[in-house]
Image (tube, grey):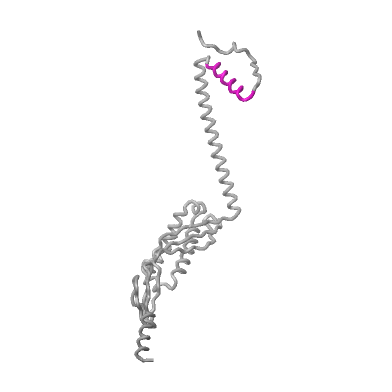
Amino acid sequence: MNPLYLFFIVIILILLAGIRIVYEYKRALKFRFGRYVKTLQPGFRWIIPLVETIQVVDIRVITINIVSQEVMTEDNVPCSIDGVVFFKISNPEKAVLEVEDYHFAITQLSQAALRDVCGKVELDTILSKREEMGKNIKSIVETETHHWGIEIIDVKIKDIQLPENMRRMMANQAEAERSRRARIILAEAEEQAAGKLLEAGLQIDKSPSAIKLRLYQTLSNIAAEKNSTILFPFPEEVLPRGKK
């Protein structure tokens, strides 16, 4: 084979081996003999084979789960809490050069922050103020990750697992609270009904003939349900009559 042809083939292979495509949602850090050179922007890029290498970093929002953590709250209630962290890389250079594995580092920081925050408050606070707990965890984590070129978007507490006996006690407490509210509502209804009956009685007293009309209406309601014989223990004439 002609040496010139062989030379051209080698050149073409070298050119093809150095082609790199960087997607819009990624950035590529270029290293030359292990030394950082620059960050490649999206598009068609070329590097020198065997001399230069790249490390690709995703700059989209990334989600990391906080595995369930055993936490002892301030009121000595054991519970298991898990969550999720949303973050994105704002500075690819720092994310690669300042920390060995930012995924692992954020995971460990989030777990430690979750135990620290939830261990300083009572169980009722955790259950009723999840959003506030998430903000406190985010504040602790982003204090460290800020130096790594990583922006913490949000931290959410997903689930809180309580011991079986604690769940039973909370269910009993909720049932007792509902029963208390039902009794209060029933008492208020009785009070309102008594007031209305008193007003109706006073109104009827103003017109004695209204008593007879009310009596006839009651008899009509009774007769509508079933056929029956109604006996009066007193004659109708003893009922109050209107003044002539």
Q: Which residues are magenta?
A: 210-226
Image spot of residue 219 (x, y percent): 59, 20
Which residue appears farthest toward the front when viewing the image?
1
Seen in the picture, residue 106 relative to 242 is either above or below; the reply is below
Seen in the picture, residue 194 relative to 104 is either above or below; the reply is above
Image spot of residue 101 (x, y percent): 44, 71
> Can you say which quadrant of the picture contains the N terminus?
bottom left
Image spot of residue 93 (x, y percent): 36, 72
Work out whether residue 29 or residue 207 is closer to the camera in this orientation and state it: 29
Magenta span has 14?
no
Q: Quadrant of residue 153?
A: bottom left
Image spot of residue 203 (x, y percent): 49, 19
Magenta span has 213?
yes
Seen in the picture, residue 94 relative to 85 is either above or below; the reply is below
Evaluate whether residue 240 shows in this view. Answer: yes
Q: Quadrant of residue 134?
A: bottom left
Work out whether residue 82 or residue 59 is closer to the camera in this orientation and state it: 59
